Amino acid sequence: MTEFLNEITLFSVISLGAIGGVAAIVLYMVAQKFKVIEDPRIDKVEELLPGANCGGCGLAGCRALAEAIVKAESLEGFNCPPGGNDVMQDIAKAMGWEAGEKTPMIAVVRCNGTREFAPPKVRYEGLMTCAFAHSLFAGEGGCPYGCLGCGDCVEACNFDAMYMDQETGLPVILDDKCVACGACVKECPRNIIEMRKKGKKDRRIFVSCINEEKGGLARKNCKVACIGCGRCVKECKFDAISMENNLAYIDFEKCTLCRKCPPVCPTNAIHELNFPPRKQKAEKAAAKEKEPGE
Amino acid sequence: MGGVHPPENKFAEKRSVERLEPPKSVAIPLSQHLGAPAKAVVGKGDKVQAGQLIAKGEAFISANIHASVSGTVAKIDGVIDASGYRKKAILINVEGDEWAEGIERDESLIEDSNLTAEEIIKKVYDKGIVGMGGATFPSHVKLKVPKGKKAEYLIINGVECEPCLTADHRLMMEKGQEIMVGASLQMKALGVDKAIIGIENNKPDAIAHLSKIAAGYPGISVEPLKVKYPQGAEKQLIKALVNREVPSGKLPIEVGCVVHNVGTAFAVYEAVQKNKPLIERVVTVSGSSVKKPSNFMVRIGTPVAELIEAAGGLPDDTGKVVNGGPMMGKALNDLNVPVTKGTSGILIFTEKESSRPPEQNCIRCARCLTICPMGLEPYLLSSLAEKQRFQDCEDERIMDCMECGSCLYICPSGKPLLDHIRVGKNRVGQMIRERSG
C-alpha cells in the first residue's frame, strides 16, 4: 500500500516538475521575444502626477500625460491643472528640464439667475439632466442663456469642488477644491462656466451673465441680467471690458481688479469675489454716481 | 412589430371643423419646416395680403412662407415657438381680410387639371406645402423622385394613430373629394398609378366615406388598418400596406413608396387647383376637461391661447398644454406660441393626467423590447445613454428610434426611457456630423 502511494507521489512530483520546467522555458522565451521596452522615465513622471485621471490636461489620464511628456521631451504645452505649478516644477526638476509658470485658473459660474432673480414661470419634470432640458426649452426662468439647474456640472466634477445650492438652484464652486480641470466647462450645454484667472488672494471680478438678448428682453426674465448698457466699459480705465452682442465681457488678462466697475452696473451683474467689504465712503460715492443716470 | 394601445380619447371626432376668424395679430415663424429657415422678403411697415409670399425658402430643403392674414408687418423679431426658444418670426398686425390675387376662395370642387408633373411640383413648392402630419418635411422634395429610384406607390396617411387628435379624421369626412383630387395630383407628379389610403379601423365612418369616393378615382384604394400605435409612422405604415421594410437609415423611396399625410393631400389640392398657399390648417383642441373639444381651421401664426379660448378657455385643473399628440407632442411653456404648419393639435391635460409616475428600478420585464415598433432595445439604449456610452448607442442603432414614446408609455417602472434615448440621439447625431466634417 505504501509502496503504491510512494509511486504515485513520485510520479506526480516528477511530471508536474517537468511541466513546470517546460512552461517556464516557454514563458521565458516568449517574454524575451515580445519584450516591450518602455522608457523608465514614464513611470517616474506618472508617479509625480496626482493620479486623479481627471482628463484636465486634455489627455486620457495621468499615464497618458506622462507618456506624452516623455515623448515630447519637454513640458512645453502640457499642463496638469489639479497638480498646478508645483507638480510641473517637480517633473521639470526630476527630468532636468525647465518649466514655465502657469497662471492658476479657476472655474466661474457666469449666471446669477437664482430663483429670486429669475423666478420660475413653468415647472420642469422631465429627466433631470441639463443636456436634455437644454434640448427642450429655455429653462424654468425663461432665460435661454441661463443655468438650467439640473447639475450636470456637479456630476462631472471629480474633485467634489462643486455643489448645487438648493436655495438658489445654481451650482457653487469651492475655491479651495477647484483644480481647473475644465470638466464642468465641457459638460455645460450652455457654456455658462468659464475658466478664469484665479487672481491675487483668489480675488476675481467677472460679469455673471452670458445673455446676448437685448436689454429689455433679458431683464424680462431676470433681474440681474447684463443689459449691455456699456457703463462698465466707460468706467474701465484699462480697456479690459468689451461689449459684444449686448453683453459685457471682462478680459481677465487686462483686468487689474480695481473694483471700479461693479458699483456702476445698474443690474448688479458684475460680481466681485473674495474682496474685503467696501468702505462706507466708497459705497456712498458709488451710490451717488448711480443715481443721476437712473 | 410591436406597438401599444393607449386609450383613444377622441373627444372631438364628431365635431365638424369650425373656421376661426383671424386674430388681431399673428406671428409667423420663419422656420416652420424641416430644413433651412426661409428668408424674409418683406420688411417692417410693409402692407401684406393674405396669401402673399413673405419669406422664401431658397435652400434645397426649405419651404416658402406666406402671409396668413392681411395687414401691416409690425416687425421681424424673435418669438418663442414650440421649440421653447426664441426664433425669428414675422409679426403682422391684422387689418381687414384681403386676399392676394389669383386665389380662389369658393368651396367648389375643381377636378380636372392639365398641368404636367413638373408644373405640379413647382406649384407645391411655390405655395409652401410641407408635410402636415407633424414632421413638416417640405412636400416638393418628397415629390421629386431622385435619379435612379422609382416610385411605385403613393401612400396617403389617414391613420391618425395618436390618441386625442381628430384633425385628419374630420378633414377626411368633410374634404374627401378634395383629398382624392390632391392624391391624384400627387400620383401624377410622382408618375405612379397606385395610391393607397391607409385608415385605422377606429374610424369606420371615414373608411366608408372615402371608399365610396375612391370608387370614382382609378388607382386609388382605401385600406382599413389594425388599431395600434404607432400605425401611422411612415415605416410601419409601409410595412402594413405593401409589406415592405424600409432599411435602417434609408428613406421610403428605397422600397418604391412615398408617404403623404391626408392633410398634405388636401393642401396640395388647394395649392394646385385653387392657387392657395398653405396659410391655414385644421388644429384639434381637446382634452378630458376642455369644455368644448373642437377642430378649428385656423390661420398660421394664431397664438395658441386664442384657440384655447375658442374651445371654452383653459380649465382650472390644467397641468400641461401639449403641442401635438399625447404620445409624441411636447408640453408648451408659453401659451402665446403661434400655430405653425405642423401644429396638428393642442391638448390640455389635467394635473393628474400629466404627472409622471415616480421612477423605479428596471425589473427586466422586457415589455419595452416587445412593443418597440423599430425592434430596438429601449432599456439598453436608455442605460447606455445615461452612462454616456454614446459609441455603443450608435452601434445599437439608436438613430433608428423615431421617438414614438411607446417604451415610456409601457414601462411599469416609470423609467424616463425616451428622455435618455433623446439625449443619446442628440449626442450620436453630433458625433456623426463631426465625423463627416
Image (cartoon, rainbow, N blue to C red):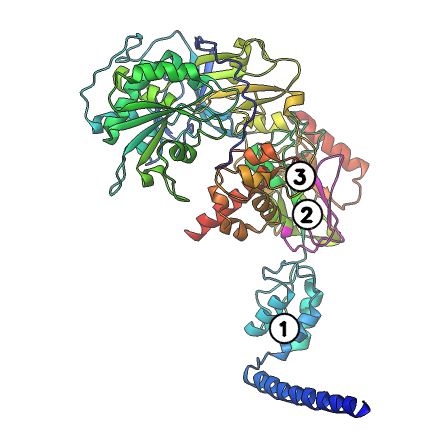
Which residue is labeled 2 in the image?
A155
Relative to A251, residue B42 above or below:
above
Query: CB under 8 Å between callouts 3 and 1?
Result: no
Figure quadrant of residue B410? top right
Crowding at label 2, few (<14), some or many (≥20) Cα neighbours within 10 Å? some
Q: Is residue B253 left or right of residue B73?
A: left
Which segment did they paint magenta?
Answer: A154-183
Whether residue B222 appears in magenta in the rendering, the answer is no
Q: Given the image, on which type of amino acid does mark 1 rest?
A: Glu
Distance between the alpha carbons at the discs numbered 3 and 1: 43 Å
Which residue is labeled 3 in the image?
A150
Q: Nearest the camera: B224 or A44?
A: B224
Distance between the alpha carbons at the discs numbered 2 and 1: 36 Å
Identify the mark nearer the N-term, 2 or 1: 1
Figure quadrant of residue B424? top right
Q: Is residue A214 visible?
A: yes
Query: SS class of the residue under badge 2?
Result: helix
